[in-house]
Image (tube, rainbow, N blue to C red):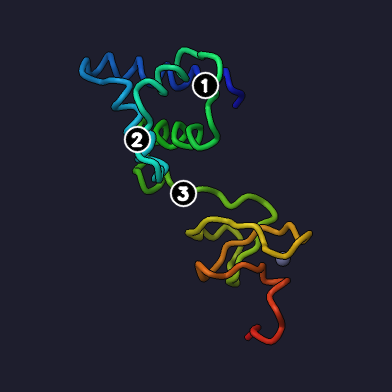
């Protein structure tokens, strides 16, 4: 989806909610969206959501916000919050585990720390920095 479509989605989502619940506010949208993506900095402010909704200059829909929108939309369409937070693994991502194709794995893909490797992988350990291919042989089991 491009910026304009995402912005429209946000505006529509807000309008639909507002119709059902007159107490719904931009601040509440900001809280819901931030919660959906587990945003570290806390809720988006009502001013920010308003500016994005109205398409004000300098307020694009950030990739995180777009993610939140997608998940919130899925929840409103009847998906559970857990289901909405699941993401398909992007192609080309390696896993530290042997997994059958089509398996659902929990975790965030990260970039291998080897300069020039460029592989993305899902780690089995929060401290692991190298993909399975670059992992030094001496610690391979
Ligand atoms: Zn690597």
Indicate the quadrant containing the N terminus: top left, top right, bottom left or bottom right: top right
Q: In the image, is the residue at mark 2 within 8 Å of ligand 1 by its beta carbon?
A: no
Residue 138, percent from left and from top: 69, 87
Q: Tell me what residue is drawn at x 34 percent, y 27 percent.
A: 29
Residue wearing tag 2 = 43
Q: Quadrant of ligand 1?
A: bottom right
Secondary element at image label 1: loop
Seen from the viewer's position, the closer of residues 34 and 47 is 47
Q: Are marks 3 and 2 in contact (CB under 8 Å)?
A: no
Q: Tell me what residue is drawn at x 46 percent, y 49 percent.
A: 86
The circle on residue 86 is: 3
The circle on residue 59 is: 1
The reply, left or right, for residue 137 in relation to residue 3 is right
Considering every residue shown, the one lying at the far right of the view is 116
Which mark's residue is nearer the viewer, 3 or 1?
A: 1
Q: Tell me what residue is drawn at x 63 percent, y 50 percent.
A: 90
Using the numbered discs, state the Cα–Cα distance from disc 3 to disc 1 in whole angstroms.
Answer: 27 Å
Residue 48, percent from left and from top: 42, 23
């Amino acid at each position: 989806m491009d910026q304009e479509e995402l912005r429209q989605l946000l505006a529509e989502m807000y309008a639909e909610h507002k119709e059902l619940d007159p107490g719904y506010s931009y601040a509440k949208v900001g809280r819901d969206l931030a919660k959906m993506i587990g945003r570290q900095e806390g809720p988006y402010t009502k001013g920010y959501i308003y500016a994005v909704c109205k398409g004000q200059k300098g307020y694009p829909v950030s990739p995180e916000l777009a993610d939140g929108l997608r998940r919130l939309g899925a929840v409103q369409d009847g998906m559970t919050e857990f289901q909405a937070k699941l993401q398909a693994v992007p192609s080309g991502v390696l896993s530290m585990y042997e997994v059958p194709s089509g398996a659902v794995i929990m975790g965030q893909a990260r970039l291998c720390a080897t300069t020039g490797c460029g592989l993305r992988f899902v780690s089995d350990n929060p401290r692991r920095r190298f993909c399975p291919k670059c992992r030094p042989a001496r610690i391979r089991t």
